[in-house]
Structure formats: structure tokens, C-alpha cells
Image (tube, rainbow, N blue to C red):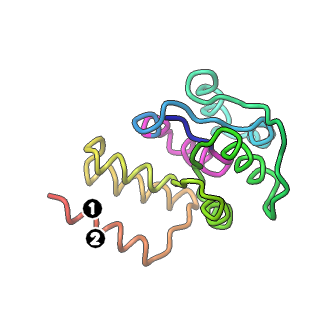
């Protein structure tokens, strides 16, 4: 199964170099040309990681039409691609996630991908918690309540 991503999730996956975890769940990440152009405009170490995944795991798709939605351009393009291809949405943007859900699009974020890998025994508890802490070190926002829930959840597995 393929999934559509917006820019923020791809950047966090690249920062932690964890595209392999997404590959455990999805066959390919699709990004709109508009989202890819946003990524390419940034000069950072993550850009190089992302470019290595091109044609291997990330596919750029030219949209037929970008829907008029009350979101930023990149999120509009990503959600338009979800609707065009009838695929889920990989996003960590709260507003975009909620809007996608309101349109009936299945949503998962980077945390969800990490937890899925933990639940499917592709990551140990220690690896899972380290990745979550690495996300926090890279300015990924997790509320104190959610962080506590994740700790409790992972500790419930022995």
C-alpha cells in the first residue's frame, strides 16, 4: 500500500534517517511535485537523504488539480493527491490531519509509524523510546500528555 506525505513528515523521517520504518508498512511514499519543490528549495542534510530515496521509495506525482482548501499550499497539494489517488496521508501537521480526516482520509504520523513498528516487533521498546526522544531533540512537538501515554503504552509490553 502507498501513502501520500506532506513536507514536515518527510523532513522528520530524513532527520532521523528512518525511511526503513515507513517501508515496513508502506510500499511507497507519494509526494506531489509541489511538495517536492518545497523540499528541494531547502538546503539541508535532510534534503540529501530525501533525494537518495527518490525513485527508490519516494515518487513525485504531478497533480491534475489542486483543490481549494483552507490550508497552506503544500498541505492542499498533499491532500489533493490523497483524494486523487484514494490514499492515506502521512502528516504531523495537526490542522492538515484534522482536515484530511474530515474528508474521510486515513491519517498516520511519524509517531504512528514508529509505534506501528514497535507493535509489529520491528523495534524494541528501547529503540522506540530512543526514536521518540530523537524526534523531540529535533523540535518535533509531542504534548506532555501524549508523551506520557506513549511511555505507559510501551511499558505495558514485556
Q: Main secondary structure of the magenta part?
A: helix
User: Disc 2 and disc 1: Cα gap in Å?
Assistant: 6 Å
Q: Which quarter of the figure is the C terminus placed in?
A: bottom left
Q: Provide the residue designation for mark 2.
A: 152
At a point 25% along the width and 44% down the height, the residue shown is 121
At a point 50% along the width and 39% down the height, the residue shown is 17
Of the pair 103 and 127, the residue shown nearer to us: 103
**Rendering coords of residue 86 (x, y %):** 62, 42
Classify mark 2: residues with Cα within 10 Å, few (<14), some (14-19) or many (20+): few
Tell me where the magenta segment starts and ends, as one range.
5-21
Q: Is residue 56 above or below residue 103?
A: above
In reply to whether residue 10 is colored magenta, the answer given is yes
At a point 84% along the width and 41% down the height, the residue shown is 65
Q: How many marks?
A: 2
Residue 123 in which image quadrant? top left
At a point 40% along the width and 35% down the height, the residue shown is 24
**Rendering coords of residue 16 (x, y %):** 50, 44
Of the pair 131 and 152, the residue shown nearer to us: 152
Helix, strand or loop at mark 1: helix
Residue 140 in which image quadrant? bottom right
Q: Provide the residue designation for mark 1.
A: 154
Amino acid at each position: 500500500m502507498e501513502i501520500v506525505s506532506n513536507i514536515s513528515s518527510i523532513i522528520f523521517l530524513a532527520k532521523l534517517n528512518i525511511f526503513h520504518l515507513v517501508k515496513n508498512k508502506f510500499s511507497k511514499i507519494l509526494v506531489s511535485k509541489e511538495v517536492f519543490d518545497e523540499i528541494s528549495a531547502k538546503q539541508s542534510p535532510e534534503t540529501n537523504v530525501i533525494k537518495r530515496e527518490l525513485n527508490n521509495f519516494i515518487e513525485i506525482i504531478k497533480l491534475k488539480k489542486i483543490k481549494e482548501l483552507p490550508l497552506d499550499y503544500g498541505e492542499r497539494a498533499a491532500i489533493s493527491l490523497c483524494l486523487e489517488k484514494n490514499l492515506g496521508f502521512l502528516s504531523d501537521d495537526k490542522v492538515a490531519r484534522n482536515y484530511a480526516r474530515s474528508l474521510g482520509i486515513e491519517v498516520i504520523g511519524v509517531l504512528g509509524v514508529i509505534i506501528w513498528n514497535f507493535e509489529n516487533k520491528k523495534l524494541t521498546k528501547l529503540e522506540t523510546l530512543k526514536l521518540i526522544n530523537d524526534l523531540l531533540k529535533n523540535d518535533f512537538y509531542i504534548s506532555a500528555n501524549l508523551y506520557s501515554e506513549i511511555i505507559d503504552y510501551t511499558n505495558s509490553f514485556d
